[in-house]
Amino acid sequence: MKESGRKHGALSPCAACKLLRRRCAEDCVFAPYFPPDEPHKFASVHKVFGASNVNKMLQELPEHQRRDAVSSMVYEANARVRDPVYGCVGAISSLQQQIHSLQTQLAAAQAEVVHMRMRQFSSSSNAGGAMDMAVDQANMGESLWSC
Ligand SMILES: [Zn+2]
């Protein structure tokens, strides 16, 4: 991550001050996170959250957490712009559905493996090792269901 153009001082206001048409002060809370060469970042955050709310949220946070907060707000704002109804919840729930369907598939595949090992075990006379493996697979299936 590169730093903003603070060294140029008032000559290049940060993206926030530029959009809000105000003077970018030396201690501008937006300047470190909204450099003038990335105007779209502040534009979407301002559209979704409002500049004064973003200002308030940043003021309330210790400085070392502000960069993460800004990148989270930018992500959420962009998701909200793309999907005005669900925002990033849309992405989260579609990923949760994917996880659920993949877990179901995995459980079915593991059950099939256990089933095949059991059959192999019962059809072979000296299969001490196969029994251990079948138990291992069964345990893996168990732990999957519990999560
Ligand atoms: Zn500024």
Image (spheres, rainbow, N blue to C red):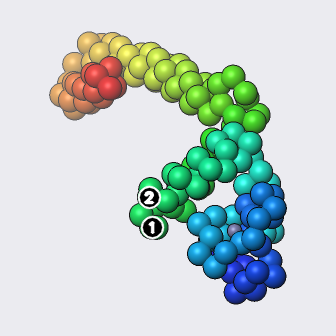
- At x 52%, y 57%, the residue is 58
In terms of image quadrants, where is residue 5?
bottom right
Q: Is residue 9 above or below residue 23?
A: below
Q: Residue at x 69, y 34 (%)?
A: 80
Identify which residue, 67 or 15, lies in the foreground. Answer: 15
What amino acid type should be assigned to the residue bearing mark 2?
Leu
List x then y, in percent, for residue 88: 62, 33
Q: Vertically, is 80 above or below 98? A: below
Q: Is residue 42 visible?
A: yes
Ligand 1, image quadrant it occupies: bottom right
**Which residue occupies 75% across, 86% down?**
8
Kindly identify the residue that appears in the image at 74 percent across and 42 percent down.
47
Asked if the residue at label 2 sits under 8 Å from ligand 1, the reply is no
What's the mark number on residue 61? 2
Q: Amino acid at mark 1?
A: His
Locate the N terminus and report the quarter of the image it occupies: bottom right
Residue nearer the viewer, 145 or 55: 55
Location of residue 35 in the rendering, given as x and y in whole percent from the top left corner: 72, 69
Point out the residue furthest to the bottom here. Answer: 7
**Viewer-side residue, 104 vs 91:** 91
Disc number at residue 26? none
The local crowd at label 2, few if under 14, some if 14 to 19, many if 20 or more residues have their Cα within 10 Å, is few
Q: Which residue is mark 1?
A: 64
The C terminus, quarter of image: top left
Image quadrant where residue 91 sits: top right
